[in-house]
Amino acid sequence: MAAPPLGRLVLTHLLVALFGMGSWAAVNGIWVELPVVVKELPEGWSLPSYLSVLVALGNLGLLLVTLWRRLARGKGERIPIQVVQGLSIAGTALLAPLWHYEAPVAGQPHSVAFLTLAFILALACCASNVTFLPFLSHLPPPFLRSFFLGQGLSALLPCVLALAQGVGRLECLPVPDNGTTGPPIKVSPINFPERFSASTFFWVLTALLGTSAAAFQGLLLVLPSAPSVPMMGPGLREGTPGAEEEEEEASPLQEPPGPVAVTSPSSDPKALQLFSSRSVGLLGLLAVTNALTNGVLPAVQSFSCLPYGRLAYHLAVVLGSLANPLACFLAMAVLCRSLAGLYGLSVLGMCFGAYLMTLAVLSPCPPLVGTSAGVVLVVLSWVLCAGVFSYVKVAVSSMLHSGGRPALLAAGVAIQVGSLLGAMAMFPPTSIYRVFRSGEDCVDQCQP
């Protein structure tokens, strides 16, 4: 069967990437904006741990998607995807004017608007993992990598915007007591603003999500209209050994009608691969890496970075997020398919994570505080940790693609379950036992 024109193939890859960009752009945008809003919202350094818990509670979106599948069998993922995209656009559009509003809760001020909208966006993003990925089971494997590249863009583009925004500047100025001209006896923190406000940042993020939603609609338009017109991926040929399996993998990009989409698990040999030791190992690895990157480490990022200054925190958040798309590019060029190799990379990432956790435990006086070496080490550790784990997640998901829709659905569930367990594990030490301590601006708490 003839391959599609090159222009159509490139356009489809582009639309898939832009579609993937909208999966986690909202939550990624909130994360990279934390260095800006953390100094203005009442939760302070604990704000990332609040956000981690809310993102974990966003797993309720999985239940809503499951309920949808029960009530609307054979409808596919198209409607849930459009609902997810609509919630993301509405949530970020409301964040722009409302993010800084506070309200008393149990006698303490809290950023109710910011946290409520963050929870709504988390619901949408978590639901995207079990709607976007299963939709891609109808595409050849190269399109899955384009999707993960798009997910990398969901981190890259907010990061570029955050770099352009900057993080502001803090200066500690000596101030005379009671406004007299005598010797200064205290130091006052003076904050200088960023190049543009957090509200502007959220408006631009809304535009990016709108672009992703438009790309999905465009993708539906360019997909073949009938199952008899398959979109063949590069390297797939007719008449070669295994052509039948490759042709199934490269089935039409459009979701088939309901009766065709419903298959019996017992008649699908690929679904049985989920119960092999290799598949269980891959799903377990996916759950563990997401527990660390989406739950455990983000909850303590402020405690590990802010003792070294706001610039260190800003660079760690932004450059750490940039490591995600770079890892996707690397996976497109060199994909590790060895389970032992992926385990080895995961151990390397855990070593960086252990160093960052140690810094958070020792906050506000970690080693090398106040030195350039300390700033370089903490930023580099965050970048390498994020990059290694991002590569592992892309490699594992690519390997699971051969299991078809059930395997990709299981991958989405593993991602969310791991993230939930990681965030829940960090709630007691951050919010109950106060293992991690925050510092004060312009106050040296590390003197012997």
Image (cartoon, rainbow, N blue to C red):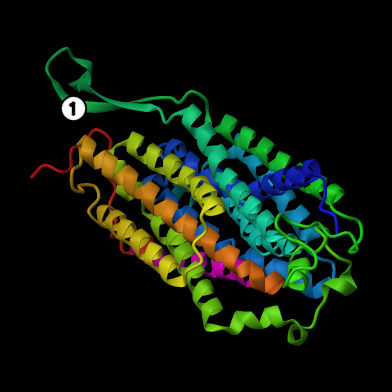
Side of 57 relative to 191 (left or right):
right
- Which residue is painted at 58% across and 67% down in the image? 399
Q: Residue furthest top?
A: 181
Q: Nearer the viewer, residue 42 or 351?
A: 351
The quadrant in which residue 18 appears is top right
Q: Which residues are magenta?
A: 410-429
Q: Main secondary structure of the magenta part?
A: helix
Q: Is residue 182 magenta?
A: no
Q: Residue furthest bottom?
A: 266
Q: Nearer the viewer, residue 404 or 350?
A: 404
Compared to residue 382, the image places residue 357 above or below, namely below
Q: Amino acid at mark 1?
A: Lys
For disc 1, the marked residue is: 186
Q: Quadrant of the C terminus?
A: top left
Q: Quadrant of the N terminus?
A: bottom right
- Which residue is painted at 34% across and 36% down in the image? 310
How far from the left and from the top, in percent, is residue 165? 49, 28
How far from the left and from the top, in percent, is residue 264? 79, 83
Q: Secondary structure at mark 1?
A: strand
Compared to residue 293, the image places residue 96 above or below, namely above
Q: Is residue 52 visible?
A: no
- Which residue is painted at 56% across and 77% down in the image? 279
- Which residue is painted at 27% across and 44% down in the image? 377
How far from the left and from the top, in percent, is residue 82? 77, 53
Compared to residue 80, the image places residue 15 above or below, namely above
Side of 123 relative to 368 (left or right):
right
Compared to residue 21, the image places residue 72 above or below, namely below
How crowded pointer 1 is (Cα within 10 Å; few <14, some 14-19, many 20+) is rated as: few
How far from the left and from the top, in percent, is residue 434? 30, 59
